Amino acid sequence: MGTQVTVRELLQLQSLRNFKLLAGKKGLDNPVASANILDFEYAEGARLARGEIFTKKALVVTSFLFAQHAPEKILPAVENLVQVGVSALAYKPVVFEALPEAVLAYADKVGLPVFSFADEVYFENIIYEVMARVTLDEGLLSMERSLERMLLQNPDGAELADIAKGMFRGPAANCAAVCLWGTGGYTLSFSSVVNNYNKSAVDKDRAALGRWRDRIFALITLDSEDIHKYEAVLADLLHACRISSGKVRLAFGGVHPLPGGLAECAREAWTTATVCELEGKSPMHFRDIGTYQYLVPMQDNPELLAFMRRTLAPIEENEELLRTAIAFVQANGDMAETAVRLYCHKNTVRYRVNKLRELLGIDEGGLLFDALATAVKLYLLKNG
């Protein structure tokens, strides 16, 4: 069953992410049920039933090519679209760099969101992504809501049992979650992934796909506790969905029993994804992220933030020492590795670390690293 989404929600789609709002802000919560292209319907001599071409609650995309030599046609066309009941208008500024002020003023008055978008974004991609989003079946939308509950709330055992029942077709003892997203300019379209998944022969009793924010979740169920078996299922899933593992980042949570450990699976994968993005490494497992396991979910804790500020205060204005502290922590305290990261000699690193010890007032080497590790990791989480 299809469902309506708002203009505001559609701005999260890959093709719409860089839309620039020009007017009609009060209409961002207009519902959208379809997408249409405005081409020559308002050209001279056109005899078309526009109410049948443009559907109510549609997002309409256009370049206003029909008004290339007559910009005065734009306002009547927009007025007609409002009469039809469209929800938003997006234009590519290839013919008109800017729209007439009268058009923008009218859009503000009636609450019609008007956007511009970059030349490299194709009409077809916008239409495809919008239609894929507004026609998502209720199961996928339920999955998205379930992920949000597990990541932001603390559902009890009965709720988790209901969530697991809705996610998975077959019974299994355990579950592991994986977060995946495109990297290096590669766009991972959720609608395309789901379409390929549905058409594939992959065992859908053992895997469920969902999305939360800009991440795709793959939740895999098996009777095994061996994470390598989950990795093998994921490899089959990526192949079935036509996803190149070299073009995505993968963040694994641990293996947990169903249904009670389902939320923990999702939270661990999400936490690992944060660290994976921060350090630029993939694949990454929750078991390997060390103190980030608790620092990510507690990164807004006032006591931890106060510790970070207090620890780094003596070097916060010294860019060289701050970079050294970050590299030292990322190298797990290894002087040689720190030197490689900083492109300098190991003796230079040793001198700077001694300077850190002096400024921070910590004599013992192990205590210095422990203090720096917590403070630097929090600093990176808060500052990217």
Image: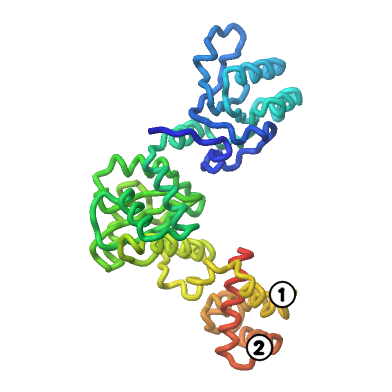
Residue that appears at 47% across and 52% down: 148
Precedes in sequence: disc 1 or disc 2: 1
Image x and y of residue 11, in percent: 56, 40
Residue 205 visible in the picture: yes
The N terminus: image quadrant = top left
Quadrant position of residue 288: bottom left
Which SS class for mark 1?
loop
Quadrant position of residue 251: bottom left
Residue that appears at 65% across and 18% down: 79
Which SS class for mark 2?
helix
Distance from Cα at disc 1 to Cα at disc 2: 14 Å
Residue that numbered label 2 is attached to: 357
Q: Vertical placement of 104 versus 318: above or below?
A: above
Mark 2: amino acid: Arg
Image x and y of residue 122, in percent: 53, 33
Image x and y of residue 5, in percent: 51, 36
Q: Is residue 255 shown left or right of residue 276? A: left
- Disc sitting over residue 316 in the figure: 1
